[in-house]
Image: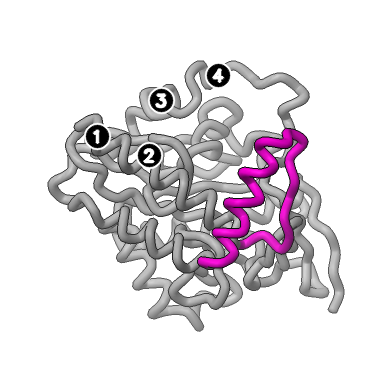
Amino acid sequence: MNQKEVSIKEMHRCTLTVLKKIIEICDENSILYFLAYGSLLGAVRHKGFIPWDDDCDVLMLRPDYDRFVRFCDKHRKELLPFRLMNRFNTPNYPFGISRFCDTRFKMVRDKAESAGMGLFVDIYPYDGMGNGKFLEHLHIGYFRTYYTRMTNYANLNSFVPSRNKICNLLRRLLYAIAKKNGSEYYLDKLEKLANRYPYESSKYVGAIIWGTGDYHFEKTLFEESTLLEFEGVKVNAPRRYHELLTICYGNYMRLPPESERQQSHGYKLYRVDNISTFSED
């Protein structure tokens, strides 16, 4: 099998093709999606990918996410070489969210198995997070962070030590517990947490099944969309994207220090086809 490592510039170019396929599916089936996180920031600040970012993020409110998943599962053969991968259709899949992958590429993660993933766009479902009570958000924020981190520990191929001795002891304990329980145990916990507050009656929504911290957003932020330019493609964004980005990043138009401008997700990508199917323009 011919394998060629993919540079970040090529990764961006090819990921854009994956994103275009997602947009095509959503537009043809009246499924509402939004560019999210670093990709939304990139659209606003760079009109495309953040130059050093190594992934692409899309969010869908839970009803649209479920419709998207059902469509991709039903049309799995027709979508090839694209494939929606998640823990319900892919053995050993390590995340709560889905990834829409181009299977003409192979991912190799630095410290964990890749479950056959290729070049990808993350698809985050936004679930109900209650009505703004302090204890609701505290409960979700704490347990989402804990379950996500324990899932990461469970998926590691080997223990990664810390320089701090006390932190190292705690990490070893958590790693041992996580490996004993297995990642499916914690992913099930995240799924249960995501169903705690009904989506329809919740004032707040967020990505409960994967992530850390207490990011919660008023559902009204996603009532209206606007089009932003992303690498020459028009993509959906929340009309009130300024509020969203400020919650996530503060002064989001300020560039980070040069020392922080680097790939951060711990994986490499390789082509596994012999003929390039993407334009080199």
* Real-space Cα separation, disc 3 to disc 4, in angstroms: 13 Å
Which of marks 1 and 4 precedes in the sequence? 1
Label 2 belongs to which residue? 141
Residue 258 screen position, x and y as percent: 76, 22
- Residue assigned mark 1: 135
Secondary structure under tag 3 reads helix
- Colouring scheme, one of rainbow, by chain, secondary structure, one colour: one colour
Residue with the mark numbered 3: 247
Residue 253 is marked as: 4
- The residue under the point 67% across, 44% down is 169
Tell me the amino acid under the disc marked 4: Met
Label 4, label 1: how far apart the Cα atoms are: 32 Å
Could you classify mark 3 by the number of other residues whose Cα lies within 10 Å: few (under 14), some (14-19), or many (20 or more)? some
**Looking at numbered disc 3 in the image, what kind of residue is underneath it?**
Ile
Magenta highlight range: 155-181
Distance from Cα at disc 2 to Cα at disc 3: 15 Å
